[in-house]
Amino acid sequence: MDGLGVPAESDTMADEAMESEVEDEDKSESGSQSRESETLSGPIGAVIKVLDKLNGKYAFSLNQVFCRSETDLTIDRLNEKAELVNDLQTSLLPSIRTQLVALLQSLDLSEYPIHPCPNPESTAAILSKLDGILHETRSAVEEIALESPLPSDEHDHHLKDLKIFRLNHLLWKTKAIIQNHLCEILGICGLYIVMWGHEDMDREDSKHQARLSNWRKDIVEMSVTCKDLIDDLIGWISLSDFAMLQKEWRVSSKKVDRMLVALVEISNETYSRPGTEGTQTGGEDDRAVNEAHRARAIELARSATPIIKLARIFYDKLSKPTGKKPFMLNAGICSKGIDALRDKMRSFDTQIDHILGLLCVIYQPDGDIEPRIKSLKSVTFQTWACLEKALLRLAFHLKPANSDGRNYDAQNNFKTWFLALEYQFRLACYNLNQTITSRLGDSDGDESD
């Protein structure tokens, strides 16, 4: 934990398309605007200074542990950490959200007014409160996850909500909200206030109004994202270990849904990779080669579709059970076991991503297609191997959820749910590899012609 490491779910939900759209414009003017801000005085100048101070204070922090983990901790010894977790959930995080809403109101941004009229005095008071809350919040999560006593990841199975993996993720998620989202909002608020308050600005000028409007839109949209992340974290704290894992798997399921949409577009010849629109050029021979490549890509995409569909079924079986929940996480699992399970599931997730990525590149090639088809064959085997490892880890840590006290054979129960899926997945991978082999043969034939 030497630096801020944010898990894939969180954790990052910033609007990258929006950022790239305004980034060059903001950078080109940031120097002049910082100089202009130095000339602002009174309440507006004071607000700018506070915003700069908050950004400098909270935009970065180190996550370093200076103490050893302990193997024999009891819940009683972690009472202070438990109280801090409760404070975060019930007081500190909700207070950050409240101050963010108040900040938008003080800047007259809550309802997109045509001619906004910020209240610098109110903004300064809100930022002062926010500073205190952020300081208390960061101190709390650092004490929770970085300071003694800290449980060992191999000996914390009995610590319930205070397992080290939960404490670490609470730290990362909280700091991600502050550093990656809230500080960015504060930075744009500073640009907005500078432009709004500068005497030399013509407020009736269309370019001036357009720029203010864009910044207002950015601030409001990023604030919505930030508030959603805060709400999500408040709810996340109350989740069981298994519910946290299921939340991750539901994210993977939604991603697979988007993959299936892309495969349908490839099959229907409507898919377009970003940055490749209208790039195909050349004579009749080149177009003929491209058409042959595209035909192979479509066949490969159709052959890969069952794999992606089965991946969605796999995630849904784990995270969206119908009726009574068939499984629960073994109560004896420790943080190390949970992290190992997450790693196996992430490896499978990565290989599924890789399959789609290769298919998209094969469909719209920017070079020799044959190495990518060969890579697809290798990745298909790796995907099946990753599923096998994930299923083995799941079988070790999941047990039937029953309330009547009867003893069930956990292994047989698990096989009932996943053995058929594993067989279908293996068959789908075999079929895709057969298609790949035949397509490579066609590619060799084309070259020999």
Image (cartoon, grey):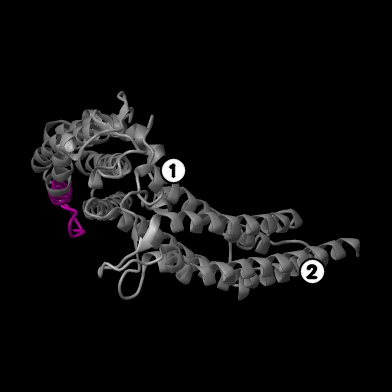
SS of the residue under disc 1? helix
- Whether residues under marks 2 and 1 lie with C-beta atoms below 8 angstroms apart, the answer is no
Mark 2 and mark 1: span between their CA atoms? Answer: 40 Å
The disc at residue 154 is: none
Residue 298 seen in the figure: yes
Between disc 2 and disc 1, the foreground one is 2
**Vertical relation: 149 (above or below) 219:** above
| 153 lies left or right of 198 | right
Q: Position of residue 26 (x, y in %)?
A: 38, 42
| 181 lies left or right of 116 | right
| 195 lies left or right of 267 | left
**Given the image, on which type of amino acid does mark 1 rest?**
Asp
Q: Where is the C terminus found, in terms of image quarters?
A: bottom right
**Given the image, on which type of amino acid does mark 2 rest?**
Ala
SS of the residue under disc 2? helix
Q: Nearer the viewer, residue 4 or 98?
A: 4
Q: Where is the N terminus found, in terms of image quarters?
A: top left
Q: Residue 107: say if magenta.
A: yes
Residue at x 16% of width, y 39% of height: 84
Find disc 2 in the rendering and name its residue.
288
Disc 2 or 1, which lies upstream in sequence?
Answer: 1
**Vertical relation: 243 (above or below) 262:** above
User: Residues in magenta?
Assistant: 93-116
Q: Nearer the viewer, residue 97 or 184?
A: 97
Q: Position of residue 431 (x, y in %)?
A: 68, 70
Find disc 1 in the rendering and name its residue.
24
Residue 127 seen in the figure: no
User: How many residues crowd mark 1 within 10 Å: few (<14), some (14–19), many (20+)?
Assistant: few
Q: Residue 95: say if magenta.
A: yes
Direction top: furthest residue: 66
Residue at x 52% of width, y 51% of height: 347
